[in-house]
Image (cartoon, rainbow, N blue to C red):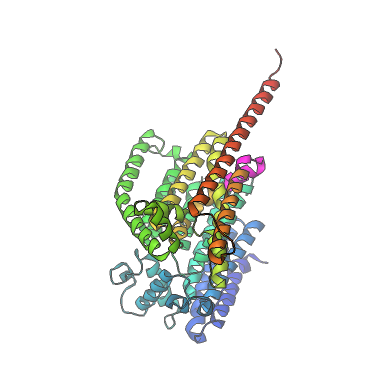
Amino acid sequence: MSKVFKRIGLPIILGSIVSWIFYYFSEYELKDVFWGTWLLTSIFFLLLINLYQKFGPTKFLTWAIGISLFLRLGLGLVTTENLLDWGYDQEPYQSGYLFKDAYSRDNQAWDLAISDQPIWAAFSNDFFTDQYGGLLALSSLIYRLFTPDAHFQINIIFFVTMINVIGILFLALGLREINKDFGFSTSSKIIILIFSFYPDAVLFSASQMREPLLLGISACLFWIVQKQEIKIWNRFALFSLFSIFLLLISLKIGIFIIFSFFIWMLFQPYRKQIKILNSNIIILPVVVIVIIALFFSYNWILEAGKWDAVLLERNSGFVQYIVSIIGSRYRLLFASLYGLFQPVLPAALIEPSKLFWKILNSLRAAGWYLLIPILMYGIVYFFREKEKIKKFEYLFIWSLSIFWIILSSIRAGGDMWDNPRYRLSFLLFIAYIVGIAFCHGWKTKDHWLTRFFIAELVFVLFFLQWYISRYTGLFENLPFFHMVFVLSIIFGIILITGIFEEIKIHKQDKRIKENSIPFQ
């Protein structure tokens, strides 16, 4: 296959195939959607394939990108065409949208596209469905440029999907910088697989949502941070440019992601080239920025979380039952803890629902529950790691990820959709710490990793039988707080036996070390 065909011919052919498939499943005339869609898809395939060829293809990355693209576009196309039958009797589902936010924003984007107003009107108060205006403006621009005579919503799904998939490429390039002499390590492959196939990442990329854009841009920032050969001012310019895009999509989440990457830079060797970054004086402004951000965010997060917790209680008989026991004073605390486990796996498996949503929510929950034990094991990995710089770099990323997960849960007030959505925005960092920790725990057969998985399995089984009893009445169940008490005892036993095992390992290592000292 010639280089010219790979770089130009192949993207055009792929664009033609995808555009024809989109048109075939649509209700519009060929002239209204095909040619504009073909131009849009060809441009993005040209970008993806040429970037891929420039940075060096690998078999693993080819499969990861190819399957990721297929899953996202396939799910987007299938749901757009079938939610009328699979979804509930609500306007967003009947119109082919997976999320109410996507439905509202996309329809206003179309209204703006066919109006006489400029695209930057998306940032005005006239268009209220997008808090920040960035995705609304981009969606309107795509409609106006490529399908001005048809509200062809699948094109927006294609756009956010491609940004997300291009992000997979940049994540892989950044990881390759870390292991430059050895290619993709096992941990790097795990990180890429999580970023590519985490169920919520696939789901949100199959709709007109901002999260896939946040993920794609975050991956570009990751590459900028990890790439060692970029000149300082070029790095600053690229970092600033992508940061602006990120802030236009989501200001509040974007600020936190940008701040996290900026601190990550302080662990890189090239920081010594910048005088101010190579000095301890940089610590003071960073601390001040964090304190100011927390001060201004505290009341907003707390008040928003309280209101969301009230809404959660109103819509859930289970939450009403718990709050009636613990009191409304602890409503937000319970809602936040509840949100950490959303989507709740036992509930997703047992609660009555349409088949499509049962399968979808079960997969989403399973994806999150596979990560939870490894996230907990992350602090164990910190103490296991011997290399000082790598150790504290990991602790920083782990701490930020845990902080963001907890903050997301407080802000979302236990909501089944908002908790995972806010969490998803930080997926790159979460995937990074999970990939490294799991690879270490698996290779060393660390007993703590096994114990965390056992503890979660016990948790799931207990609540699974609780939900089965609640919805079927097949057997009598323990009262909720009695069950929590029993679980606490089991978790305590797992923890204590783990500590004893750790003491035993420490003594064995000490004995081996003493026996290895040569006789003098």
Determine whether, in the image, residue 126 is placed left or right of residue 107: left
Q: Main secondary structure of the magenta part?
A: helix
Q: Quadrant of residue 320?
A: bottom left
Query: Which residue appears farthest toward the front when viewing the image?
Result: 476
Residue 318 is situated, as x and y percent measured from the top left of the image, at 45, 61
Determine whether, in the image, residue 96 is placed left or right of residue 50: left
Is residue 377 visible from the viewing direction of this image?
no
- Quarter of the image with the C terminus is top right
Is residue 4 shown above or below 326?
below
Residue 375 is situated, as x and y percent measured from the top left of the image, at 53, 47
Determine whether, in the image, residue 118 is placed left or right of residue 8: left
Q: Nearer the viewer, residue 446 or 102?
A: 446
Query: Which residue appears farthest toward the bottom when viewing the image?
Result: 29
In the image, residue 467 lies in the stretch drawn in magenta:
no
Total marks in image: 0
Is residue 490 visible from the viewing direction of this image?
yes
Q: Which residues are magenta?
A: 435-449
Determine whether, in the image, residue 40 is placed left or right of residue 137: right
- Please give the name of the residue rendered at 31% of the width and 55% of the height, measured from the top-left corner: 303
Query: Which residue appears farthest toward the top when viewing the image?
Result: 520
In the image, residue 445 lies in the stretch drawn in magenta:
yes
Is residue 448 shown above or below 28?
above
Q: Nearer the viewer, residue 73 or 42?
A: 73
Q: Quadrant of residue 377?
A: top right
- Quarter of the image with the N terminus is bottom right
